[in-house]
Image (spheres, rainbow, N blue to C red):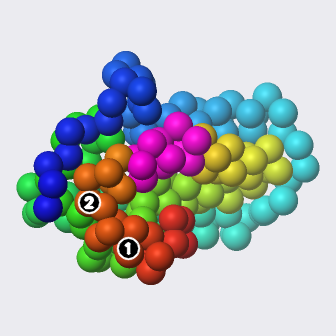
Amino acid sequence: MRENQGFTKNNMKKRQPLPPTYFIIYLLLAIGLHFILPIMQLIYFPYKYSGILLMGIGIWLNLWADGLFKRKNTTVKPLEKSSALIIEGPFRFSRHPMYLGMVVGLLGVAIILGSLIAFLVPIAFLITMHIVFIRCEEKALEQVFGQEYLDYKKRVRCWL
């Protein structure tokens, strides 16, 4: 196994905010847009409560994946050196379960809010994560772990 030198300046900026910062921004965006532009209410009580379940699933998915990073003694931060390729737990069905957990959490918030505009936010977040982080991360993982990561990519989808 080769040592990961982390992301280079060429494929990711050093001062790039981390994914949780994006999550909070998009969460506030969903709430703000819901109240500023409450376009078409899609979900009503008591069905809105199902959003709490999705938020819980998103949190659980993040905690599960984070626990694996800690157990393998490797970093969860995209800009830091990674020492292990994790392919167990939620990584068996998603190459990016922490981003998936954030999307699921935002979807839960959208269900609780219930307006059409709130449902656009998880989609925008997913696209942002893919463009800003996933493409760079996957290139770096291919460089570090080579064929092992390429085989993993063939077996496991990016999101679900």
Viewer-closest of 151 and 100: 151
- The image quadrant where one finds the C terminus is bottom right
Q: Nearer the viewer, mark 2 or mark 1?
A: 2
Q: Is residue 67 above or below residue 88?
A: above
- Using the rendered view, name the quadrant where residue 46 is placed: bottom right
User: What residue is rendered at 9% in x and 55% in y?
Assistant: 73
Considering depth in this image, is 20 or 116 the residue closer to the camera? 20
- Relative image position of residue 22 (x, y in whole percent): 50, 35
Q: Can residue 18 be seen in this view?
A: yes
- Compared with 113, 57 (above or below) is below
What's the CA distance linking mark 2 and mark 1? 10 Å
Q: In this view, does 75 lie to the left or right of 14?
A: left
Residue drawn at x 53%, y 37% is: 132
Q: Name the residue under label 1.
A: 152
Q: What residue type is labelled 1?
A: Tyr
- Magenta part of the protein: which range? 129-139
Asked if the stretch drawn in magenta spans residue 160, the answer is: no
Q: Find out whether the residues at labels 2 and 1 contact each other: C-beta distance under 8 Å.
A: yes
> In the picture, which quadrant includes the N terminus?
bottom left
Sequence-first tag of 2 and 1: 2
Report the residue at 37% width, 24% height from top: 9
Q: What element carries label 1?
A: helix
Q: Report the residue at 47% width, 76% height from top.
A: 154
Residue corresponding to mark 2: 145
